[in-house]
C-alpha cells in the first residue's frame, strides 16, 4: 500500500486534468462523453452468469483479443465475457466484432483508484482477468490480488524504451508485476525485459495478432473497393499518425503517375477532417469512403473514414505504407497486410513491432525506408513491378501463416488459472 501511495496521490491530483482531457477529446469525438459514469465504476448492467474479464484498451488490442474471446466463449458456455476499454474506438470495435451477443458485455475500465477498482470488482466479480498487451494499473492489480482474482497479462510486449521508463520506479513496478498470476509475452526479448523488471511466471506465447484473420465479408468489401477505383492503382497509407500524412501526401503528389490514387486511412477517427483538410490545402480532389461513390477520374486521394475495415483496405491496395513508422511512434500493425498478401513498406520507427517487422523483412514481405519520400518512392516502384509485388505478397501470406498459434497458447494459460481457483469461487 505504501508503495502505491505516491502513485495514488498523483492520480487524485491529476483527476481534474484527466476529466478536462476527456472533454477536450470530446470536441472531435463526442463519444468520449458517453458512459462517463463507468469510468468511476458506476455500472447499470450485471453479467447474466460468471464472468471472464478481458481488458483491451483500444482498437488494436480489441482485434488481437477477438480469437481468444471466441475460444473462451466456446470452451466455457456457462460464462460471459466482459470486455473493458479505455477509448470509444475500442468499444465501437468490440461492438462491430461481437454485435449484440448477450454473452459479451462491454464497459469502460474505471480510473486506477483503489475505491473505484474495488467497486468494479464487486460489481462484476470476475473469475479471471485477462489484460491485453501492457496495460499495468498498480491499484487495479493489487485489488485483484487481494480478492483472489487471477490476472493474466496476455500478448505482452515491452520495448526497450518502455522498460527503461518502468525501471525508474523499480519497487512499484516489481510489486505491480508481482500481482499478476501469469504473463504471456509476444517474444523472448519481451519476456526477458519483463523478467528483468521483476515479473514472475513469464512464458513466451507469441503474437496473437497473427491469429486475427479477415472475414469473407471484409475480403469481399476489399474487392468492391478495388472495383470502385475503376482500374486505377491504390497505394495505401495505413493507420497514419499526426505529422505523417503531409509528407506522404506531398511525396505521392510529386512522384505518382496520374493513374494512381492514395488511399489514406488515419489511425484515429477524430482526425479524419483534419487529414481531409491537407488535401484541400493542396488543391487536389479528395473523396471519402463514407460517400460510397466510385472514384472520379480526377480524384487523387481517397480518405478511409471508416472503422473496422482495415482488412478490406489492405485487400484493395497494391502496396501498403504502414503508419506510425515514419515518425517515432513505434509503428502500427503490419501483420494484417501480410495476411492478405499486400506488400509492406515500413519507415525507420518500428519499436512497437520490432520482431514482427524484422521477420517480415527477412521473409521478403516488407521493405524498410528512411523517410516518407523514400517510402513512397519504393511503393510506387512496386506498382510498376508486378512480379516483385506478387512475390512479396506471397511471402507475406506464408510469413503470417507460419507464426499463428499464440491464441491457443494463451488459452492454455487462461485455462490453467481458471482450473487452479479454489473451490467455491
Image: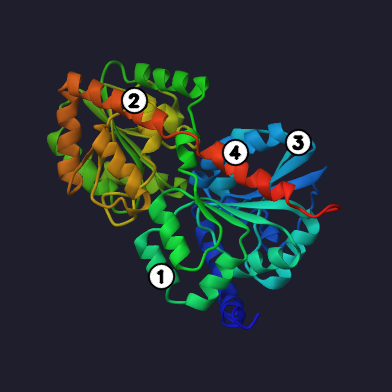
Q: In x, y percent, where is residue 30?
A: 56, 52
- Percent x, y of residue 23: 56, 62
C-alpha separation, residue under disc 1 versus residue under disc 3: 40 Å
Could you tell me which secondary element the residue under label 3 belongs to? loop
In terms of sequence position, does the residue under pointer 4 or pointer 2 come before the other?
4
Name the residue at 63% across, 58% down.
181
* Residue 399 visible in the shown view: yes
- Residue 165 has which mark? 1
Horizontal placement of 246 versus 169: left or right?
left
Closer mark to the observer between disc 3 and disc 4: 4
Cα distance, mark 4 to mark 2? 24 Å
**Residues at badges 1 and 2 in contact (C-beta under 8 Å)?**
no
Determine whether the residue tagged by mark 2 lies in a helix, strand or loop: loop
Residue under label 2, please give it.
Answer: 341
Q: Which is closer to the viewer, label 2 or label 3?
A: 2
Q: Are the two marked residues, 2 and 3, in contact with CB atoms closer than 8 angstroms?
A: no
Mark 4, residue position: 68
Q: Earlier in the sequence, mark 1 or mark 3?
A: 3
Of pointers 1 and 2, the one earlier in the residue sequence: 1
**Could you give the CA–CA distance between mark 2 and mark 3, rounded to whole angstroms?**
35 Å
Between disc 3 and disc 4, whose residue precedes?
4
Amino acid at each position: 500500500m505504501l508503495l502505491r501511495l505516491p502513485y495514488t496521490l498523483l492520480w487524485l491530483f491529476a483527476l481534474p486534468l484527466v476529466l478536462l482531457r476527456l472533454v477536450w477529446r470530446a470536441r472531435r469525438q463526442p463519444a468520449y462523453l458517453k458512459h462517463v459514469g463507468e469510468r468511476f465504476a458506476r455500472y447499470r448492467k450485471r453479467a447474466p452468469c460468471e464472468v471472464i474479464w478481458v481488458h483491451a484498451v483500444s482498437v488494436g488490442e480489441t482485434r488481437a483479443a477477438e480469437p481468444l474471446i471466441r475460444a473462451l466463449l466456446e470452451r466455457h458456455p456457462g460464462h460471459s465475457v466482459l470486455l473493458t476499454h479505455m477509448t470509444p474506438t475500442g468499444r465501437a470495435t468490440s461492438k462491430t466484432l461481437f454485435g449484440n451477443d448477450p454473452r459479451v458485455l462491454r464497459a469502460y475500465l474505471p480510473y486506477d483508484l483503489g475505491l473505484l477498482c474495488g467497486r468494479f470488482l464487486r460489481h462484476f466479480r470476475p473469475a479471471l482477468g485477462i489484460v491485453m498487451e501492457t496495460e499495468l494499473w498498480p491499484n487495479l492489480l493489487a485489488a485483484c490480488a487481494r480478492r483472489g482474482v487471477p490476472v493474466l497479462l496476455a500478448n505482452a510486449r515491452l520495448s526497450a524504451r518502455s522498460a527503461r521508463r518502468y525501471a525508474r520506479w523499480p519497487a512499484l513496478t516489481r510489486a505491480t508485476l508481482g500481482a499478476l498470476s501469469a504473463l504471456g509475452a509476444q517474444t523472448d526479448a519481451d519476456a526477458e525485459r519483463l523478467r528483468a523488471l521483476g515479473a514472475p511466471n513469464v512464458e513466451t506465447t507469441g503474437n496473437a495478432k497473427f491469429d486475427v484473420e479477415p472475414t469473407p465479408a471484409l475480403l469481399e468489401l476489399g474487392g468492391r473497393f478495388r472495383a470502385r477505383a475503376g482500374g486505377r492503382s491504390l497505394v495505401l497509407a495505413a493507420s497514419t499518425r499526426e505529422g505523417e500524412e503531409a509528407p506522404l501526401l506531398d511525396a505521392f503528389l510529386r512522384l505518382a503517375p496520374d493513374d494512381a490514387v492514395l488511399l489514406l486511412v488515419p489511425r484515429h477517427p477524430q482526425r479524419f477532417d483534419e487529414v481531409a483538410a491537407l488535401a484541400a490545402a493542396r488543391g487536389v480532389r479528395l473523396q471519402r469512403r463514407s460517400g460510397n461513390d466510385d472514384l472520379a477520374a480526377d480524384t487523387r486521394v481517397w480518405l478511409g473514414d471508416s472503422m473496422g475495415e482495415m482488412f478490406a483496405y489492405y485487400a484493395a491496395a497494391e502496396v501498403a505504407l504502414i503508419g506510425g513508422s515514419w515518425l517515432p511512434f513505434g509503428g502500427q500493425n503490419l501483420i494484417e497486410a501480410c495476411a492478405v498478401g499486400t506488400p509492406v513498406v515500413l519507415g525507420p520507427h518500428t519499436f512497437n513491432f520490432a520482431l514482427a517487422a524484422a521477420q517480415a523483412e527477412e521473409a521478403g514481405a516488407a521493405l524498410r525506408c528512411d523517410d516518407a519520400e523514400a517510402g513512397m518512392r519504393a511503393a510506387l516502384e512496386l506498382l510498376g513491378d508486378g512480379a516483385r509485388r506478387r512475390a512479396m505478397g506471397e511471402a507475406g501470406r506464408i510469413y503470417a501463416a507460419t507464426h499463428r498459434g499464440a491464441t491457443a497458447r494463451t488459452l492454455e494459460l487462461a485455462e490453467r488459472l481458471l482450473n487452479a481457483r479454489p473451490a467455491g469461487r
